[in-house]
Image (cartoon, grey):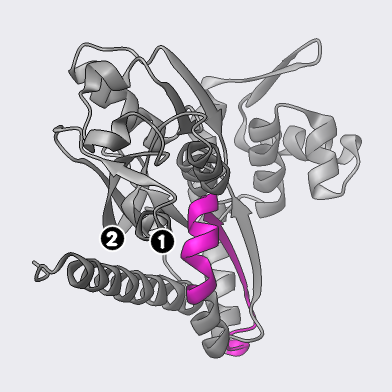
């Protein structure tokens, strides 16, 4: 009979590779350092090869260890997925769901999604992790979260993303800013302004920076904030100008506290999606959350487009 590998040893080994520390691995798995050390040693004995080496306090993974880690991750993920799917069937809606989302999504998208989801699965234990797209993608790859609402980059690796909606980043200023007088501004002139932008490293920041680079320009003065609401407040008091999603500033533009400025540029379009690891088989709970998210976003943005068309006297396209 073919011998199988001990799953507890695999878990200890994978966690050690991820943390690079016997102490941290022991803490995460609620075991002693000695137990982790013995577990990895027994796994090496079982497989007749060395998986890790120690140089002082540093842990190095061998080539055999690298190969095993790839397979072990898939095995552990499949085991976890199987457990969750069985629990979904046995305890309908009483499972756990870990969601990641940007602060914008947490504020504008998740409340409506969670309201409907809670009607379907009132006993589901939900955890929400707010973060920017790069961090959420990494957490998704490592199976630290189940689903993430993100601004979808063009180069996704090991990640599946289902589309939610697209939006446009527009230039907004205070009503007393000089750009507000004509309602338009050239990119060369905008580059000289103080920019108030969302976090550097986010896909949103990259899009804005790329628009300037395409015009062979550099942003000379900018500050970063992790809150769209804080950005709007600074722009309102004429502290700077910003590129923000049109649907997040619709109320401010309608009331006149912010002004939309034409740049004459190609539109800055973002694509939003809900992502999960490619090697993950979605549970009933996850499938339901995904479907509700798509329905809510579709309804939310179709109503905004209709409202915008009515206010401008144009028919929706």
Q: Which residue is mark 1?
A: 251
Distance from disc 2 to disc 1, alpha carbons, whole Å, reads 20 Å
At 81% from the left and 10% from the top, the residue drawn is: 56
Q: Which mark is residue 165?
A: 2
At 50% from the left and 49% from the top, the residue drawn is: 140
The answer to whether residue 109 is magenta is: yes
Q: Name the spot of residue 189 as percent of width and height, x first.
A: 27, 18
The answer to whether residue 273 is magenta is: no
Residues at badges 2 and 1 in contact (C-beta under 8 Å)? no
Q: Name the spot of residue 241 as percent of width and height, x first.
A: 41, 31
Please indicate whether residue 273 sits to the left or right of residue 122 in the image.
Answer: left
Pick whichever of labels 2 and 1 is earlier in the sequence: 2
At 63% from the left and 77% from the top, the residue drawn is: 95
Q: Name the spot of residue 249 as percent of width and height, x first.
A: 40, 53
Would you call the spot at circle 1 few (<14 residues within 10 Å), some (14-19), or many (20 or more)? few
Stretch in magenta:
90-113
Quick check: 157 above or below 185? Answer: below
Would you call the spot at circle 2 few (<14 residues within 10 Å), some (14-19), or many (20 or more)? some
């Amino acid at each position: 009979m073919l011998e199988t590998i001990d799953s507890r040893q695999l878990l200890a080994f994978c966690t050690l590779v991820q943390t690079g520390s016997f102490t941290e691995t022991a803490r995460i798995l609620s075991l002693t350092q000695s137990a982790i050390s013995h577990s990895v040693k027994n796994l090496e004995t079982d497989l007749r090869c060395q998986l890790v080496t120690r140089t002082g306090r540093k842990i190095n993974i061998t080539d055999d260890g690298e190969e095993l880690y790839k397979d072990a991750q898939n095995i552990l993920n499949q085991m976890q997925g199987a457990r969750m799917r069985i629990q979904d069937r046995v305890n309908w809606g009483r499972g756990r769901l870990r969601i990641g989302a940007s602060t914008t999504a947490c504020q504008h998208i998740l409340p409506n999604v969670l309201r409907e989801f809670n009607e379907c699965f009132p006993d589901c234990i939900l955890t929400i992790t707010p973060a920017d797209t790069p961090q959420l993608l990494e957490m998704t790859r490592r199976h630290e979260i189940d689903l993430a609402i993100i601004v979808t980059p063009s180069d996704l690796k090991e990640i599946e993303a289902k589309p939610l909606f697209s939006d446009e980043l527009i230039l907004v200023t205070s009503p007393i800013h000089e750009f507000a007088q004509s309602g338009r501004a050239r990119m060369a002139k905008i580059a000289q302004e103080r920019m108030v932008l969302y976090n550097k490293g986010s896909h949103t920041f990259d899009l804005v920076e790329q628009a300037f680079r395409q015009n062979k320009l550099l942003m000379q003065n900018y500050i970063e904030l992790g809150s769209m609401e804080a950005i709007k407040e600074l722009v309102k008091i004429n502290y700077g100008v910003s590129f923000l999603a049109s649907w997040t500033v619709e109320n401010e533009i309608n009331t006149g506290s912010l002004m939309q400025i034409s740049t004459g540029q190609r539109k800055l379009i973002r694509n939003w999606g809900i992502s999960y690891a490619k090697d993950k088989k979605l549970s009933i709970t996850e499938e339901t959350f995904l479907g509700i998210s798509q329905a809510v976003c579709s309804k939310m943005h179709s109503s905004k487009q209709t409202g915008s068309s009515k206010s401008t006297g144009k028919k929706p396209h």
